[in-house]
């Protein structure tokens, strides 16, 4: 449910706030999070921001065994996360248009881990009837003063189910992404360190 104090019309908001999924080589869909369109390169290409942790820890989707035991000393252990490219995972966002919903595929990314922020470049099929025609005026400034009014918008109830019939080459995915929002004010801030929820109260 959208907060009544959100001033952007819902039919416009869903074109800028997009649900994110990871699709493995087995054609299985996994809900990941929310992305925000902040720049339109052209009608078929755009730049989004999302949480960096949505692009990380993807090995768990493939049920891979850890490369090192948890007790292995760091100097002997392999702690580096494999990227979505390494794992053969497609990262996608769903863009809702007036006539159809299309898949926007991630083709590049840059991650700012200190702020748990990722900037991604996505494209949609050239023959789709849906286009990128809106972007949010987002300020990427992590410093907010106490009592600043804020609105949190995203897909907290993001789900997906998928079925595969490899013999017939038939694949189906059903995604549910109810857009929700919360309205409030900043009570306090934390200084960024590394990763999410690892700051110091400030």
Image: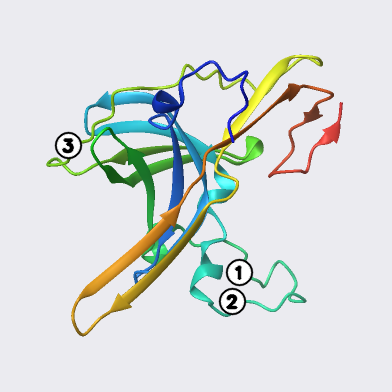
Q: Which residue is mark 1?
A: 78
Labels 3 and 2 touching (C-beta < 8 A) = no
Tell me the distance, in whole angstroms, between the alpha carbons under discs 1 and 3.
45 Å
- Nearest-to-viewer mark from 3 and 2: 3
Which label sits in the foreground, 1 or 3? 3
**Residue drawn at 55 percent across, 55 percent down:** 56
Quadrant containing the N terminus in the rendered view: top right
* 166, 197: nearer the viewer: 166
In this rendering, position of residue 193 left or right of residue 27: right
Report which residue position mark 2 lands on: 67
Give the camera-side residue of 134 and 68.
134
The residue indicated by pointer 3 is 129
- What residue is rendered at 46% in x and 26% in y? 10
Image location (x, y in percent) of residue 16? 42, 29
Question: Residue 150, image x and y in percent?
Answer: 68, 21
Which numbered disc, 3 or 2, marks the residue that appears first in the sequence? 2
């Amino acid at each position: 449910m959208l907060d009544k104090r959100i001033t952007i019309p819902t039919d416009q908001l869903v074109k800028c706030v997009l649900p994110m999924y990871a699709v493995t080589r087995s054609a299985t869909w996994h809900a990941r999070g929310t992305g925000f369109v902040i720049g339109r390169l052209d009608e078929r290409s755009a730049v989004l921001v999302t949480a960096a942790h949505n692009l990380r820890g993807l090995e768990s989707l493939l049920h891979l065994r850890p490369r090192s035991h948890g007790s292995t000393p760091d100097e002997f252990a392999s702690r580096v996360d494999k990227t979505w490219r390494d794992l053969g995972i497609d990262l996608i966002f769903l863009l809702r248009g007036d006539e159809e919903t299309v898949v926007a595929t991630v083709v590049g990314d840059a991650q700012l881990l200190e702020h748990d922020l990722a900037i991604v470049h996505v494209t949609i099929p050239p023959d789709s009837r849906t286009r990128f025609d809106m972007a949010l005026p987002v300020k990427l400034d992590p410093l907010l003063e106490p009592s600043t009014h804020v609105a949190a918008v995203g897909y907290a109830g993001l789900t997906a189910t998928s079925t595969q019939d490899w013999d017939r080459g038939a694949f189906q995915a059903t995604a549910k992404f109810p857009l929700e929002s919360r309205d409030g004010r900043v009570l306090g801030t934390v200084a960024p360190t590394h990763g999410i929820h690892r700051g110091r109260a400030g």
